[in-house]
Amino acid sequence: MIVTKVEPLSKTKYKIYLNHQFAFVLYKGELRSYKISDGRELSEEELDEIREKILLKRAKKRAMHLLEDMDRSEAGLREKLKAGLYPEDLIEAAVTYVKSFGYLNDVRYAENFILARKSTKSKREILALLNRKGICSADIEKAFESCYGESEEVEAVRRILAKKKVDVRTADEREMQKIYGYLGRKGFRYDVVRQVIQNSIENA
């Protein structure tokens, strides 16, 4: 493989192109160690060594650091590693590596996500947010099963009504329609909202 371009990425990092295709990123010291420059031919042995000893090791370390910094979904971790310009197969290897230690678990991530939001958001809202984070449907379903009891949505509706200072006992028909509309758009089921409002009126 021929080095066809060495492009500065920062003061210390460089993008390396092989046969006119972007291949990987190396630091300045690593360029010197492997005598990499335009026109230099790299043997298969040299490429394997760069990938295994430098890039794979760095990708694993980066993945571990990202998960120490904060809990992430598998899709979120992949996106971060992709932004670091690691080759796809090394991203896959790094993800497999951190999974082997139990540091990456989408069901656990989804459970923590749900627990932090279920008192103020509907299941539909949370489902949409988890979908956007790349969590698969099966993992979301498992997380919902472990985090939700029958009373969870009822309590969420109560909290929202209290936060918005809604007094359903004195609200007129127009105000009630706005309440139902607001909670409906947030994904709460009509029967749950009706139950909370009826209980509030009866227990007043």
Image (cartoon, rainbow, N blue to C red):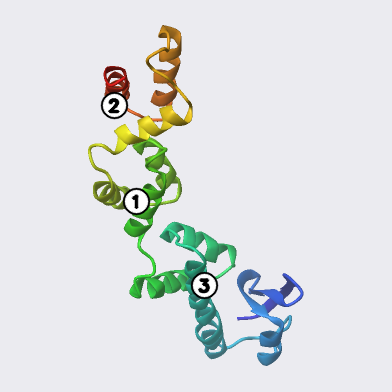
Which mark is nearer the camera, 2 or 3? 2
Q: Is residue 122 above or below residue 68?
A: above
**Which circle, 2 or 1, is nearer the viewer?**
2
Which residue is drawn at the image coordinates 40% and 25% (left, top)?
183
Q: Image height check: is 146 above or below 123? A: below
Q: Gap in Å between the C-alphas at discs 1 and 3?
A: 24 Å
As helix, strand or loop, the secondary structure at mark 1 comes to loop
Q: CA distance from mark 2 to mark 3?
A: 43 Å
2 or 1: tag closer to the N-terminus = 1
The percent coordinates of residue 23 (x first, y second) are 60, 73
Image height check: is 54 above or below 14?
below
Q: What is the three-letter code of the residue carrying label 3?
A: His
- Write the residue at 41% across / 12% down: 170
Q: Which residue is mark 1?
A: 136
Percent across and percent down for residue 65 are 52, 72
Question: Which quarter of the figure has residue 30?
Answer: bottom right
Residue that badge 3 annotates: 65
Q: Amino acid at mark 1?
A: Cys
Q: Tell which of 182 and 8 is nearer to you.
A: 182
Q: Give the residue furthest to the front.
A: 204
- Say above or below: 197 vs 105: above
Query: Mark 2 and 3 residues: CB-CB less than 8 Å, in contact?
Result: no
Q: Residue furthest top?
A: 173
Asked whether, in this view, residue 110 is left or right of residue 150, the answer is right
Give the label, 1 or 3, closer to the camera: 3
Where, quadrant-wise, is the C terminus in this rendering?
Answer: top left
State the residue position of label 2.
192
